[in-house]
Image: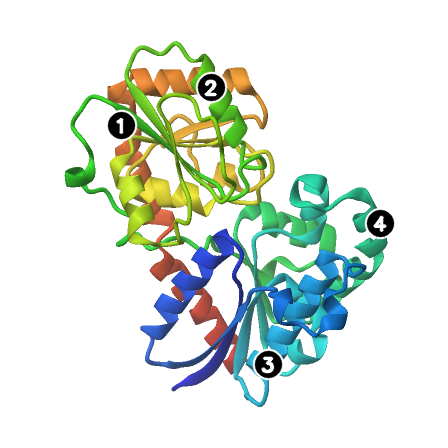
Amino acid sequence: MTHNFAFVLDQQVGLRTQSLNIERVVRADESITPTFVPVRYDAERLPLLARLPGVPKSVSGTLAGIREIRRGMSGKKQDGVLWATWAAKSVPDLVSTAPACLLMDMTPVQMESMGELYGYGPSRAAFLSGWKRKATARLYQESVHLFAWSEWVAQSLRDDYGISPEKVTTVAPGVDVSLFCPDPEQKPDDGVVRLLFVGGDFCRKGGDLLLRWAKQTRVRTPWELHLVTRDVQSDLPRGVFAHYGIANNSPELVRLYQQSDLFVLPTRADCFSLVSIEAMASGLPVICSDLGGIPEIVAEGETGMLVAPDDFDALASRLDCLIESQSLRERMSQASRARALSFFDARHNVGRILTQMRKEVVA
């Protein structure tokens, strides 16, 4: 039996990776006739009124997202829809037209707790919180199933929104483990330990902490630090290299993982970390912050190390330790790849989502 399923997918930064992986798996499934609706929040295409100087960027972006969804869903009858977009609560009439499944990396309650690091200041939170809480709660209750990236999110759905456990499935989006994989031929044999950071929002992701470490470390083993970001950096210390314009799932990104020995992301605010999973799938030990759903990715002492956000001393100590210990890196490398294959294979995890969607249609 063939199903007409729509996939409404946010496209910002890491969510773009999720979108690419979902599309790859769905297109390979002959039992699905898909409609893909990318949500870019492209305000440049809005009518002039919505782009006037007095209109907040957040408002014009939301209006753009609503427009993109309405155009993408127009005139198409669906058996079910996977909503992986924050804009779903703004189009309740469309959500109600077919069984709705939600896929989410965090809840609004969790977003508010991380506040200004996500551009969600107190004034905006106060202005929108009442409406957003009600709209989100209604959306969650009316949806037939909710897919949480992590147990951290699933717990918020149960505790903060009263969603029954039977209606929630914890399933990490995963990565393409056939694309992100170790390749010894790519790794230079020159005795240099290469560290990799991937974070579009350089400051929120803790890139400045790595620059501080690069200036202060006294580690004796030769090292290089490679930064993949959208924020241009100047006056980089010796041994630090910046890479710009690297696209999600691109050959350039894959090659950087394969050339590296250690992945580090001392993020200050995050719900999850697809780049950490990409690194693990590529066979890299991971140093990452202990927040959000990240502890469900990195197994402390096994596949990497967790540090508290903004704990520079702990970060520097763990970096120096892993740079100096090749045997520890090699042990964690093998464990990282194994854990990625077991828990974060996008083909398997997206398949679980599609299976549940089929069940909801039958029900």
Amino acid marked by disc 1: Arg
Q: Nearer the viewer, mark 4 or mark 2?
A: 2
Q: Secondary structure at mark 3?
A: helix
The disc placed on residue 126 is 4
Q: In the picture shown, does residue 173 fall above or below 279?
A: below
Q: Which residue is mark 3?
A: 71
Q: Horizontally, is 344 left or right of 102 in the view?
A: left
Q: Residues within 10 Å of mark 1 (few under 14, many from 20)?
A: some
Q: Name the residue nearer the viewer: 350 or 14.
A: 14
Q: Is residue 324 left or right of residue 122?
A: left
Q: Examine the rendering and report whether any part of residue 162 can be seen.
A: no
Tag 3: amino acid: Arg
**Residue at 46% in and 13% down:** 216
- The alpha-carbon separation of the residues under discs 4 and 1 comes to 48 Å
Where does label 1 land, which residue?
331
The CA distance from mark 3 to mark 1 is 50 Å
